[in-house]
Amino acid sequence: MPGKTSLQAFKQLLSLPSSVRRRTFSVLHRPPPNYPGHVPLTLLERGGLAIGSAFGSLRNPYRHDLIAALGEATAKPYFVSRLRRAMLENPTGRRILRDKPRITSQSMSLERLRQLPANTVGHAYAAWLDREGVTPDTRDSVRYIDDPEEAYVMQRYRETHDFTHAITGLPVIIEGELAVKAFEFANTLLPMTALSLVAIVRLKPVERKRFFEVYGPWAISNGLKAEEVINVYWEEELETDVDVLRQRLGIETPPDLRELRKKLRDQMKAEKAAKDARERLGATTGV
Amino acid sequence: MAGLLPRASKRLRLASSPGWQQQQPATSQHVGQDENKTTHFGFETVAENIKASRVASVFSSVASNYDTMNDLMSLGIHRLWKDHFVRSLDPGIATSPFADQAKQGQTILDIAGGTGDIAFRMLDYCTTVKKDTTTSVIVSDINPDMLAEGRKRFSTSPYQSAGRVSFLEANAEDLSAVESSSIDLYTVAFGIRNFTHKEKALAEAFRVLKPGGVFACLEFTPRLRNPLMNAFYKRWSFGAIPLIGQIVAADRDSYQYLVESIERFPSQEQFKTMIQDAGFIIPGQGSEGGPRGWEDLTMGIAAIHKGVKPA
């Protein structure tokens, strides 16, 4: 019976330590979830999710759930494990992994943060949220990473993304997001952050030039030389002075993107007004 | 891998065996103590009285991309199925230049027809093929969001202004808003597998149909006839469809429910028996070696069941 020998082979496969054998299951009998909401995916499914979410999020950058799914689909092998190891190698990172704090709109009370002194991390965070018109919404839960602790690392990265925005001052517009993603790639090495830089094709030429000349180099050099931002216990740093934290981490503030854009816009408006005036003058004098 | 087969099949049933068993001998359940009765919601076991609201939230969630998702999941084949379903029913009255102009058109009730796919096809067929401009369709759905999609679709059509389409928000298990023996044709396409009590829906169908009226159901089947094609089909269902749901509609769970609910639906033979038990006559039956009592579509992915209310 062909069934007999393949059954033996399968049993031998099962007896290998779990880190060595590739998990083989079909979509018809998935293994039970490791944490609530967990969906174990086969390699084919993960590949499909990676490709589908990559193109989907490029087509519609407002689909945050697809960017999240892309991150989870491309995090294994190696990258999220490396990030977890980086947390384990750092005393604060170890404490974060032990406590597993979650950032939600309940755990981060904006009223309390706004009342903090102006130069604190918490105040900067609240001020950034207000300036950009966003809230600390609950981010999508991680579903496609099998190990519960690695899933938490991914969730933590997702929830602290806004803090990275806040201490660098970069806005939520696509240019700002790309700068933060470039910084995060140099800092965390997650493939999704590098893949999302493909969205550079969606930038206007002026914005692209600014990215390659100013924000890209800033992001890479700072991301590489800074401490791993995943190891910052943000809940404990809310009352720290922002400059002190930035110095400790080794992050320089980039030029204020909104200011730069506003200056450029005003300049172009002034130039256009001058040109219109000249034309009107020319028309009346018949020149 | 014969030894693994029982484990695999047990996985498919999962922990919902009590609920699954309970769903099958439907007619012998009695009505008291509703809170303790459970039923299946996909592979989950849920209390009977909350299944309808769980289904409602699935369909509210899928309503806006319903048609895109149908095209992606069935690779557009659902259009062929629905076209064939409507054509094989041949709705509408036969008109001729000499016919009595005051002759009443048919009244069609399309159940779980929220987005109006079937209703539209019915009206187009009557108007274009049968030259019948009097037949009307009542589009009924338990979910207001799906019905809103249907209303949107009909708002620009001539049928709306001609008063040939109306919308009814109702549970198919309780069609008290519809008079008994008032419907010529009762259709339900891809809806009945979501009902908590299919027998109640069948009984209501029997009540509202006129004697001689036709019950027609287009629904997915739990498995294909051919084992090899079934293996591919199941892997597409459980692997690709929730993934497409995630990417296109940002909703993996609703599509996971949809494929699980297909798995839980009775087989064609069992469903035919349920239709007969409700009192319908299955056309074409009664002769040795005659037709089986339903029509398989695309290797048995979907099936059309028909029944006629005896006069």
Image (spheres, coloured by chain):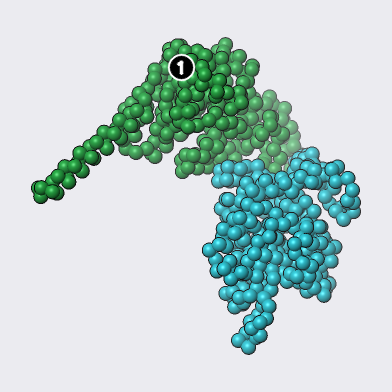
Chain colours: A green, B cyan
Which image quadrant is residue A10 in? top right
Against A201, residue B145 (above or below) is below
Which image quadrant is residue A104 in? top right
Image side of residue A200 versus residue B232, left or right: left
Q: How many marks?
A: 1
Q: Nearer the viewer, residue B147 or B283?
A: B147
Q: Residue at x 69, y 71 (%)?
A: B107
Q: Residue most toward the bottom?
A: B98
Whether residue A205 is visible to the viewer of this picture, yes or no, is: yes
Expressed as whole percent of the image width and height from the top left, the position of residue A49 reads 56, 40
Against B65, residue A31 (above or below) is above
Expressed as whole percent of the image width and height from the top left, the position of residue A125 reads 49, 22
Expressed as whole percent of the image width and height from the top left, the position of residue A171 reads 42, 29
Quadrant position of the C terminus of chain B in the picture: bottom right
For numbered disc 1, what is the local secondary structure? loop
Q: Nearer the viewer, residue A160 or A119?
A: A119
Q: Which residue is drawn at 65% across and 36% down?
A: A39
Expressed as whole percent of the image width and height from the top left, the position of residue B223 reads 72, 53
Please, what is the three-letter code of the amino acid marked with disc 1?
Ala
Residue tagged by mark 1?
A118
Q: Which of A227 and B225 is in front in this view?
A: A227
* Chain ID of residue with mark 1: A
Image side of residue B184 versus residue A92, left or right: right
Whether residue A181 is visible to the viewer of this picture, yes or no, is: no
